[in-house]
Image (cartoon, rainbow, N blue to C red):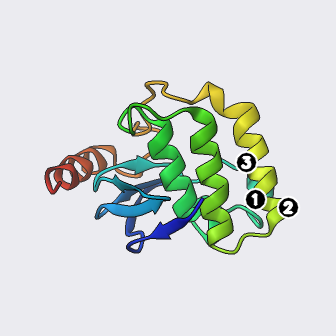
Amino acid sequence: MVIKIKNSLQTERLGNRLWVLLQPFKFSVGKTNYIVPAGFVTDGASAPKWLWHFCAPMAGPFGEAAVAHDYFYSLKGPKKMCQRYADRVLYEIGMHRKAKKIIALLVKKVANKFGYKYYRVKKEKLTKDSCYKFNWAVGRVKYLETLN
């Protein structure tokens, strides 16, 4: 797969493990272009805290990969997107951003094994427990969604 990242990832933190895209995130896989819209809420890479040295939620080689992966897993993502393809893109973007191959393979294997629990499941990430200021966060997300 040939990965092209077309713009930088611009996010704002909403909670302890929650970010919102401030502008659309554009990338391509092969000849297919994808746009994750502004206002999309992500929790980044869902790695346990002890793995953050290798796979931090929004930093390092998997920050952009996690946003693409969350988008593909979400109900807002492309309709004809299978879980395995989304997991492969997670791996490929990580490799594109110079992740160590053994770490990228581990991240992909974990997503393959446990990702089915979250694939296309309607689960609201924006909750009173997940945000610093819930009402502000909801308003911020709605405002950013109107920019699309």
* Residue for badge 3: 108
Q: Residue 50 lies in what quarter of the image?
A: bottom right
Element assignment for label 2:
helix
Q: Mark 3, residues whose alpha carbon is within 10 Å: few (<14), some, or many (≥20)? A: many
Q: Check disc 2 and give the amino acid type.
A: Ile
Quote the CA–CA distance across marks 1 and 3. Answer: 6 Å
Q: Residue at x 38, y 31 (%)?
A: 79
CB-based contact (under 8 Å), mark 1 and mark 3:
yes
Q: Residue at x 43, y 58 (%)?
A: 31
* Residue for badge 2: 102
Residue 147 visible at all: yes
Against 122, residue 23 (above or below) is below
Quote the CA–CA distance across marks 3 and 2. Answer: 10 Å
Q: Which mark is residue 9?
A: none
The percent position of residue 39, horizontal first and vertical second, equals: 29, 52
CB-based contact (under 8 Å), mark 3 and mark 2:
no
Q: Quadrant of the C terminus?
A: bottom left
Element assignment for label 1:
helix
Q: Nearer the viewer, residue 6 or 60?
A: 6
Q: Mark 2, residues whose alpha carbon is within 10 Å: few (<14), some, or many (≥20)? A: few
Q: Nearer the viewer, residue 94 or 22?
A: 94
The percent position of residue 51, horizontal first and vertical second, equals: 78, 57
Quote the CA–CA distance across marks 1 and 2. Answer: 6 Å
